[in-house]
Amino acid sequence: MALHPLARDLAVLSRSAYPLIYIVTQEEDRALRLVEAAARAVRKDYLRWSVSEGFQGAGPSDAVAAMDAVGQHEGAALIALLDFDPYLTDPAVVRRLRDRLPELVQRRQSVVVVAPVLNLPPGLEKEAAVLDLPLPRQEELGAELEKVARSEKITVDPEVAERAVRSALGLSLNEAARVFRKVMVLRKGLTGEDLNLVVEEKKGVLRKTDVLEFHELGEGLSEVGGLSDLKRWLNARTRAFGDDARRYGLPPPKGLLLLGVQGCGKSLSAKAVAELWKFPLLRLDVGALFSSKAAPEAALREAIKISESLAPVVLWVDEIEKGFIQVEGDEAGSRVFGSFITWLAEKQAEVFVVATANDVSNLPPELMRRGRFDEVFFVDLPNPHERQSILEIHLKKRGRDPSRFAAVLPDLAKRAEHFSGAELEQVVISALYRAFSETRELSEEDLDLSLKQTVPLYRTYEEKIKWLRDWARTRARPATQDSSVLDLFGV
């Protein structure tokens, strides 16, 4: 059986005489199995130390004494230290470990710290190789599903098992096992009808991360009025994920930055991308990175790890500028921002990032550099053609036939100059409220009155919106075709 990639990396580091290895993971049991597998692969002893048991039930449980005990083991070995990260703040422990490093190299031994967070003191940063244990792959989850099914004495159809495993991507091995077991216990089996339960349980698990939300697929691009150039760009990349595109010489698409006026469909577009490509949709709350129970850098690493395990996936970062306003002058925030933009530029996994921003004055300039995103689009207030399309979409969504209002919609759209998509939706909703309160069907007069009574946000923020347009003219690509071109051809 082929070695897991992390076990293979451990084996290479061990053969290369790396004395200190640090594995960052929440999955301690899984990490230890991989350390043991690596030890077998390189024909070395495997030792494990914890504060509660010492060295596998014997030897010192004191951290300083444990370092002395490491020096007494004669054979080549991989030595796993559990929950050792708090001790790395103790100067005596750090000094003792540094003293042992040359001996470890001579004896072909490697100390492997297994911990949920990276906590290396400056004195050890240059000495350690750091590995992240990725979340389990489909084959690992499939084996875990088989194990749970055997223990519950349940037979699962292979096709259902494959779909259940795909639904569980993004969970740790233990989390997936608990989800599988809970569904099997509740439903006395696992069928195609039970897969929604797996997804619901997964949502609950992801909520514990604080910074990631799992969104159901919903409205597609047909529910987004206008934005023709953005839609064309997205449709051209529908087949750009997968082996065929790689063989053709294409890299995986990185993502989009959508800038512009609020209420004009940026967030809706982010959701529609996932629906168009039938990818899972995750929302990253950048602000929550700094208020998470975990350290911001650890929270970001976990979010990235989950996103990459779900690939291909759409990662939606809403109002990204708000999350990074606090970065300037904040050392921790600067490190998180630096890690994020480095990942944007270097990521290989098929994680398509859709970031939205309303206030570009608060946007770090590093985010705009080519290589972070494939394209930067500016989403402006809708033109007359788009306004009519948006009104039709919202009438249809609420069970009304837009053709009944064909005589007035062009005029309404023309008069609704400076209205955002959200404000046009509210025009339809307000008109429906009026008709409903009078126990009758919606009329053209209701729409007309609702339009007259709605004051667009543009009236308040006219100068700011004009400045935003000027700023975007040389920095971003318009998300929609110039309406004057449409008028010229009578579209």
Image (tube, rainbow, N blue to C red):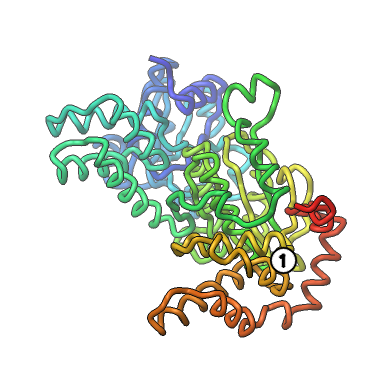
Question: On the picture, is 482 further left or further right than 345?
Answer: right
> Residue 47 at x, y = what percent?
35, 30
Question: On the picture, is 384 further left or further right than 274?
Answer: right
Quarter of the N terminus within the rendering: top left
Q: Quadrant of residue 359?
A: bottom right
> Residue 191 at x, y = what percent?
22, 35
Residue at point 47%, 26% (across, down): 109
Q: Quadrant of residue 183?
A: top left
> Residue 428 at x, y = what percent?
54, 72
Q: Which is nearer the eye, 392 or 86?
A: 392
Residue at point 42%, 27% (across, down): 78
Residue at point 47%, 63% (across, down): 400
Q: Is residue 333 visible?
A: no
Q: Is residue 438 above or below residue 170?
A: below
- The residue tagged with tag 1: helix, strand or loop? loop
Residue at point 39%, 29% (across, down): 138
